[in-house]
Image (tube, rainbow, N blue to C red):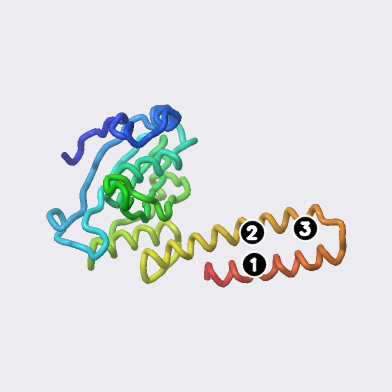
Amino acid sequence: MIGRSIPKNAFDAHATSQQKKLLIEVIERMRWINKLSFDTINLTGDEIQEIQIFSLELRKKEGIEVVLELINKAIPYHLICCATYGHELLISACQKHPNPLNTDVAVIDWMFNSPWIFEDQQHFSLNLRKSLDSVYLDICQQISGRQKETLSDLVTTERTRTELQKAIASLKAQIARCRQFNRKVELNIKLQNYEKSLETLVR
């Protein structure tokens, strides 16, 4: 029933003992606040048939990313989670697909988490048009700050961006430690190529 509280032990079957403890430490209260489907907003989708919206009131920020992954794995539907801590807000969405060995469990392709912002400065909105696929793509685009034709394209871009950022950080560390001039030149050329690739990707 929309508006009802969701008990934390609802995720016990999907959580390790450490995750159960973290869920209790991080979450003060969790509520199911809305459902977007053909029955409620007269929209359907090719890949997404239902979007659930949860609100999470937090006891602390630390560990929320792990908790969000746990919740998304345990619920096969696409979710939009609104986490609040005091007057701060984080919006989260997730691209996922059913586990072929257990359709009650989802496999996460990518998590989209906004930075923490003050509630009175939040700019996110649900644009209920075209299809549920479009609605979910739009909120993921708002969170990531990037525009792509499909959710799969957006996931690919975010994954590539993260890999490039890690590679750049690793190269910078190698350059800082390197004492051989020729090797340092090689690493700097490689670094410049990675930085150009990242710049092109995020345009």
Name the residue that disc number 3 marks: 175
The numbered dot on residue 172 is none
Q: Position of residue 153 (x, y in %)?
A: 42, 67
Of mark 2 and mark 3, the one earlier in the sequence is: 2
Of mark 2 and mark 1, the one earlier in the sequence is: 2
Name the residue that disc number 2 marks: 167
* The N terminus, quarter of image: top left
Crowding at dot 1, Cα within 10 Å, few <14 / some 14-19 / many 20+, comes out as some
Q: In the rendered view, would you say 1 is above or below 175?
A: above
Q: Amino acid at mark 3?
A: Ile
Q: Position of residue 57 (x, y in %)?
A: 35, 35
Q: Tell me where residue 133 sits by quadrant.
A: bottom left
Query: Which residue is pictured at 19% across the width and 62% down the height?
Result: 44
Name the residue that disc number 1 marks: 194
The answer for how far apart the CA atoms under marks 2 and 1 are is 8 Å
Of mark 3 and mark 1, the one earlier in the sequence is: 3
What is the tally of numbered marks visible in this picture?
3
Q: Is residue 197 left or right of residue 72?
A: right
**Secondary element type, mark 2:** helix
**Secondary element type, mark 1:** helix
The answer for how far apart the CA atoms under marks 2 and 3 are is 12 Å
Q: Amino acid at mark 2?
A: Ala
Q: Position of residue 61 (x, y in %)?
A: 47, 36
Marks 2 and 1 in Cβ contact (< 8 Å):
yes
